[in-house]
Amino acid sequence: ASTTDAGFRLFRPFFRSAHARRLGVPGVGLGLAVAHRLATVFGGCIRAESEDGVGSRFRLELRPAQAGRSQAPPNGHLGLTR
C-alpha cells in the first residue's frame, strides 16, 4: 500500500509510527511536525509518499522570498503543541 497525503498523521507533533517504536528508532516525533509547520509559515508545503517495504520520500516546496517582506512566524514561535 502507498500513501500520499500532506495531512497524514506523521506531520502531527509527537507522532511516532508503531514500526519505529517497535524497532527502537530514537526520536520524539517532532522533526516532521517542525518541517510541516515551517513550510506552512513560509507559504509552502511538505508532502510524503510511502510504500510498505520500500521506504518514504518527502518533498518540501517553498515559495521564493519577496524582497523587503518579513517571513517571520507570528508571535515568534511555531505553535507546536501536544
Image (spheres, helix red, strand yellow):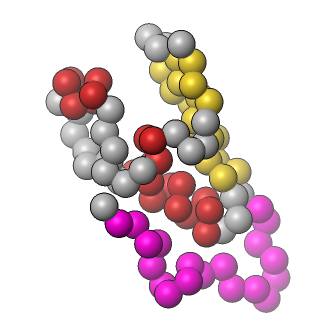
Q: Position of residue 71 (x, y in %)?
A: 66, 79
The answer to whether residue 8 is above or below residue 62 is: above
Q: Observer-nearest residue: 8 or 19?
A: 8
Magenta stretch? Answer: 63-81
Front in this rendered view, residue 76 or 12: 12
Q: Please name the predominant secondary structure of the magenta segment in the image.
A: loop
Residue 74 to residue 45: above or below: below
Residue 80: give x, y in percent of width and height: 40, 66
- Left or right placement of residue 16 versus residue 21 in this view: right
* Left or right: 21, with 3 as reference point: left
Identified at 57% across, 25% down, the residue is 3
Q: Which quadrant of the structure image shows residue 18?
A: top left
The answer to if 62 sits in the magenta stretch is no
What's the residue at 56%, 44% (across, down)?
Answer: 7
80 vs 11: above or below: below
Residue in the picture at 25% in, 45% down: 27
Indicate the position of residue 10 as horizontal and vertical percent values: 44, 41
Position of 73 compared to 32: left or right?
right
Q: Quadrant of residue 44?
A: bottom right
